[in-house]
Image (cartoon, coloured by chain):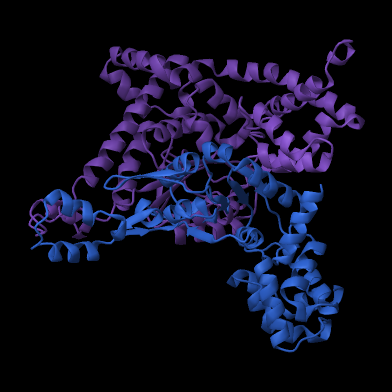
Chain colours: A blue, B purple
Amino acid sequence: MEEVVELQRRLQQAGYVAERSLAAALLLMLDLGRPLLLEGDAGVGKTEVAKALATVRDAKLIRLQCYEGLDAHAALYEWNYQRQLLAIKLLEDDARTVEQKEHDIFSERYLLTRPLLEAITCAEPPVLLIDEVDRADEAFEAYLLELLSDFQVSIPELGTVRAVSRPLVVVTSNGTRELSDALRRRCLYQYIDYPSFEKELAIVEIRAPEAAGELARQLVTFVQEVRRMDLEKKPGVAETLDWAAALLRLGISTLDEDGAERILETLSALLKTRADRAGFTREVVARIAASC
Amino acid sequence: MLSLSPSVDPAAVLRARLAGFAGFLQANGYGVGGGDAARVLQASAIAGVLDARVLRWSLQALLCGRADEWRRFDSLFDAYFLPVNKTAFEKARVARAARPQAAAPAGEAEVPVAAATQGAGARDDGNRAERHGASREESLASANFRDLHRADDVRAIEALMRRFARRMKRLRLRREARTLHGRSLDLQGTIRASVASGGTPIRLAWKDRRRVRPRLVVLLDVSRSMSRYSFFHLRLAQALCAELSDVHCFIFHTRITGVGEALRDPDPWRSQERLHLLAEGWGGGTRIGECLRDFNRRLAPRLVHSRTAVIVVSDGYDTGEPEPLAAAMAALARRARRVVWMNPLLGEPDFAPESRGMKAALPYVDLLAPGASLAAIERTLPDIMEVLR
């Protein structure tokens, strides 16, 4: 238990308010050397976990943002074709044999490392963040699985590259596509929900210290109330922090019924679709503000 | 119990208890495999078993694989490990014992279909259908789904659907093969080829943008009014899923549920059982508007892209209000390349799309197609694929 509390404290120092269950999962991940799969709605701070972990471990953070159509070339390695072409031209008058030339232009000098290759060739174990893995297709997921189980990559022209150190892998998913059972089985799992009032208040106090005190309490109450409403896109923690900054920028120091007009002006930081914005009339804002 | 034995080793009891937890979760529907018992022991050794909270969080991270498992974990952990909740534990055990029996009759009822979906059985049935002759097959293809009851019919139509799905696949492949010239130079290939000629790129290699495969999203209404048809539509969806790679199926009545995994299950018995579990409340009223709104919000952002055809199979009898349905259909139509509404009632002589739900949805539907027989569906699908090209 002490270890868990200690890690939780260090995460907090790194600017991340973690629940104890998350700290325990991170400890287990360090011990077992398994990837950690984080799921939850957008904006609940999944990506921040990896950043905080990198800070705590004093490790390098390598991020791979997944997208539709992501392939091995963009994720793993690519040859530097321009330099290779140049080298071929320069080697034209060279007396060496074709084999030697080929060996030269397919050497590591002309290899562009992409995040995954970089992660397994780091001397010190880095934190590898594979962000929004559900955006990549199933084929890439299978490829990723292979890499995460063997920690080695074979490059046809160069040979097999083995991991120097095992990266700490954090995989995030927004749950928009069902991930394969194989990937789930290979990973530790953590579901991150929208923060409770206390947790969100702690986050605001750490990340936006200027808003601390009464305003922080009020704005967190407001956001929690907004989340209970039927919205297309619920505001995440990032939105809360943005909104806090917006309130501070406009010099609003307290949320109340009379200030509803001014609160309305800042709501663009909190509500991100037209339908949601349309639902927030002056009356609605005044009612919520009055209850804060 | 082990603890009654005088020479028992407490550590062994503890190990057995911990190792049994994985099995307990598996009995409760978790995706936990055989190797996980060993991993539980390993994780417990690391996390320690003296602090229940740390053990709980560690096992939760280790054994959960999805959000619903995550949410149910706490109560299951309590039920298994905590003595105060003995009743909860007993209940869980009773439920576990009762499950197989409860599932069996449901499975039995579907025997002919389940057996016909896969493997040698399906091929056999195909032969039998052919022995009946072409006219027999033709009549099956055009027969209205609701008139088909006999097991023979069901098997024959099963084979027919598979063949039909294979035809769809060929249609797609022919089209993809028609790219002759690349759009840009493949530098990797060019350089590789040029090494042989001393670095002069004589042979150029080309690459083309990979074709985005058309995607089908099928939303099946399984409410009571559709119950005579939904069985066959599910079979068709299963055949499509088996033959085409990018088909996504959902069923809806009062909620919308993804059934792709269940349909793809290679074990026909398990597939059937999973469908049954998913279709809880099957045959009740329909709330099409709400279901589509839910689909738009949760699933559409990722699933529906500019080469997607969404096929809604429903009779349009909606117990909800028409406004949400219209709004949801509008949003869906904006996102998808083509929205097709298959109505099994269409094609009946005295039918006009006049139900409230149908009327609300109609302005946003690209194509209103009959969906009561295989022939009707077959006429419609190539047209959909054509648009997605």
- Left/right of residue A148 with respect to residue B284 in the rendered view: left
Q: Residue furthest bottom?
A: A251
The answer to which image quadrant residue B286 occupies is: top right
- Left/right of residue A281 with respect to residue A148 in the rendered view: right
Percent across and percent down for residue B96 are 74, 22
The answer to which image quadrant residue B106 occupies is: top right
Q: Residue furthest front?
A: A95
Residue occupying image coordinates x 30% and y 43%: B382
Residue B150 in view (yes/no): no
Name above or below for residue B266 compared with residue B384.
above
Residue occupying image coordinates x 83% and y 82%: A257
Is A217 in front, or is A176?
A: A217
Percent across and percent down for residue A269 are 64, 76
Name above or below for residue B39 compared with residue B329.
above
- Left/right of residue A272 with respect to residue A156 in the rendered view: right
How many numbered circles are shown? 0
Is B350 in front, or is B260?
A: B260
Residue occupying image coordinates x 30% and y 37%: B169
Percent across and percent down for residue B184 are 20, 61
Residue B218 in view (yes/no): yes
Percent across and percent down for residue B348 are 43, 37
Q: Residue furthest right?
A: B84
Is B70 in front, or is A290?
A: B70
Name above or below for residue B25 compared with residue A202.
above
The answer to which image quadrant residue B110 occupies is: top right
Q: Quadrant of the C terminus of chain A?
A: bottom right
- Left/right of residue B174 with respect to residue A141 in the rendered view: left
